[in-house]
Amino acid sequence: MWSIWEEPYNPLHPGPWAARIERKCFSVDQCNASLLLRTCFKDYFIHKFRAMLGKNRVIFPGEKVLLAVSGGPSSSSMLRQVQEGLSQNAHKKLRFSPGIVYIDEGGAVGRSLEERLRTASELQAVFRSTGFPFHMVPLEQVLDVPPSVLVPAASSQPAASVYKAAVDGFLQAAGGRRPGAAVQQQDAAGLDVLEAHTASLQQLMDSATSLTARQELLSSLRQHLLVHTARSHGYSKLMLGDSCSRSAVKLLAAVCLGRGAQLAQDTGFSDSRYGDVVSVRPMRDYSAKEIAFYNHMFGVPSVLSPSLTTKTSDKSSIQQLTESFITRLQADFPSTVSTIYRSDTHTHTHTHTHTHTHTHTHTHTAAA
């Protein structure tokens, strides 16, 4: 199995990794080298996803996990990894019960209802093929979300010390049944959208005077609606498809926007600020290039739709400018994203250590 190298693997141009690949792949003389490269890349990709979940042990056996799928490459690849992990042929099966949620943001970007329904129909076909329960939610529903969604509820997440007990209990209860296979969620025939709600949403978006502010507003509305949907349907975990490349852009953009204090929650593996619904980002070790190669090689479907930044210039917003800067720098210096990612990891470690120390000191002082 490959180690996680500093540079993302490019299966079409192995470059400096050719010698390493030969030591593993070319040891089987009777097989075609290109097929072995393909097999090794798939094994590497799947292993990294499993390792990320296994290392953090945030998702417990039997938990309901809601996958936020936008139709883009990263979230679509995440959905495929969960499918692989729950398949009968998986070496070590995932042991949680998945569901899918799609937030239709067409009302915020001026798409017609016909265009939105067409995109929703394409995604429904993909979701039905997985056999997982799914929810099609228009962004307009955020206008009906109660303010209590912003108040963290008591967390039901078990402590790490009882992880083994949770595994044993799950195995006894499951009896060999595949998680999520027994439930076929509602069939969403279409998006239930009222014109008045769409007009109110567009008015809210127009109240933001810059594209930077509109992107921040849209991100906040999306997150609140995802958390509300997870709570409403009994999901305790929310799985997001943020890649390493996306996390790097979010990190620098957050610093530019003065949101440095929220870096650990916005870009870390897990975000527990909402208490009973914990967000996780299992794709944060993958670069955008790795995901693109995997999706192309193994036929992972993507359904793309226009966003706020479609057909805008690189300097139209702080987020756009940051993304353009990192993309161009990455083209000349391929370790750019991984370097930012490592800095992000150090930030999370320091934040966690500081918080733990502060809590311990406060407890010790109170006891004295």
Image: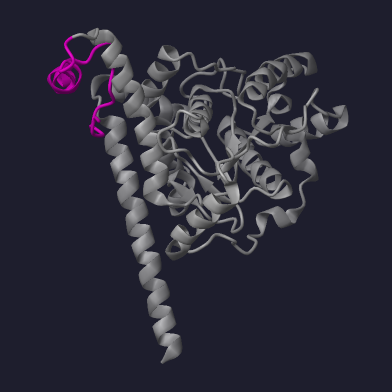
Front position in the image: 124 or 257: 124
- Residue 202 in view here: yes
- Which residue appears farthest toward the bottom when viewing the image? 368
- Residue 255 in view here: no
158 vs 188: above or below: below
Q: Quadrant of the C terminus?
A: bottom left
User: Which residue corresponds to the image point at 66% horizontal and 30% vertical from the top-left?
Assistant: 102
Q: x, y percentage for residue 232?
A: 73, 48
Q: x, y percentage for residue 197?
A: 83, 33
Q: x, y percentage for residue 256?
A: 43, 41
Q: x, y percentage for residue 27?
A: 15, 18
- Span highlighted in magenta in the image: 1-29
Magenta span main SS = loop
Residue 119, by quadrant, is top right
Membership of 286 in magenta stretch: no
315 vs 271: above or below: above
Front position in the image: 217 or 213: 217
User: On the picture, is 241 further left or further right than 222?
Assistant: left
Q: Quadrant of the N terminus?
A: top left
67 vs 109: above or below: below
Q: How many marks?
A: 0
Membership of 24 in magenta stretch: yes
Front position in the image: 201 or 176: 176
Q: How is the image coloured?
A: one colour
User: On the picture, is 90 further left or further right than 155?
Assistant: left
